[in-house]
Image (cartoon, rainbow, N blue to C red):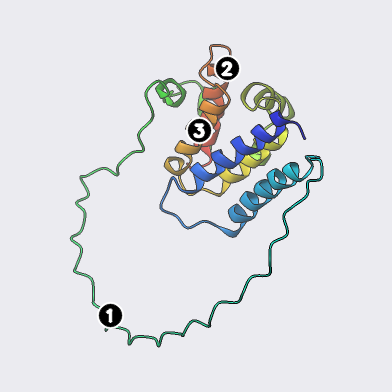
Amino acid sequence: MSAQQQKQLLDKINALYHSLFAGQQPVSRLEKDLMLDLIRQLYDSFLDFSAPPTDLPVTPPAVAPPPIPIPQPKPEPAPVSPPPVAPIPASIPAPEVNIPAGMEPLFAVKTGTELADKLGEQPVKDLTRALSINDRLLYMNELFGKDLEAMNESLKLLNKLESFDSGRSFLVTLAGQYHWLEEERIDIARDFIRLIKRRYL
């Protein structure tokens, strides 16, 4: 595996890491398996390096340390009930995830007035099935560096999130990684993000 491919794997691992810990939700088993698979691929790629055999110094066998005494468990303190939480007034809006400076054009909201626009605002249940073949090719080539696997993994991850706010930081990571703000990509990226929003309607 080339150094470029290893860097792409590392970028995927970083993007997935940021998306997993962006929200307060627990990490699912599927997300753990996806992360482990990417780490395993990176690990295997380093095993392929051929290095000349070297003579390793012979070290004497280590002497086993004396056994460590096992501490006795301390009695658990009685549980303390948390103080009552005051209800949040309905007039205070939920906090929004901040969008980094310069990324705002990607998340601009467009309100449709024509019938075609309104049909384009219908909810989507599964992002992996919502794309036509032409859309898949367009997004893969323009937004994911012609990496079909990266696009599919991103769609699966976004499919599992509960709200658009949860996926916004992951989309910001993707936008930085694949340069979505470039002039020839920004309109395509905006359409892609609009499609992602429909998953959470």
Residue 133, above or below 155 = above
Residue type beneath disc 3: Thr
- Looking at the picture, how far across and down is residue 46, in whole percent? 72, 42
Residue 40, horizontal then vertical, whole percent: 70, 50
Q: What's the residue type where badge 1 is placed?
A: Pro
Residue position for label 3: 173
* Residue 91, placed above or below residue 62: above
Q: Is residue 120 visible?
A: no
Q: Earlier in the sequence, mark 1 or mark 3?
A: 1
Q: Disc 1 marks which residue?
A: 79
Circles 3, 2 touching at the beta carbon (< 8 Å):
no
Let me know if residue 74 appears in the view.
yes
> Pointer 1 and pointer 2: residues touching (CB < 8 Å)?
no
Residue on which the image places disc 2:
185
Q: Identify whether 59 is placed above or below 145.
A: below
Is there a contact, CB below 8 Å, between mark 1 and mark 3?
no
Q: Nearer the viewer, mark 1 or mark 2?
A: 1
**Considering depth in this image, is 66 or 25 the residue closer to the camera?**
66
Secondary element type, mark 1: loop
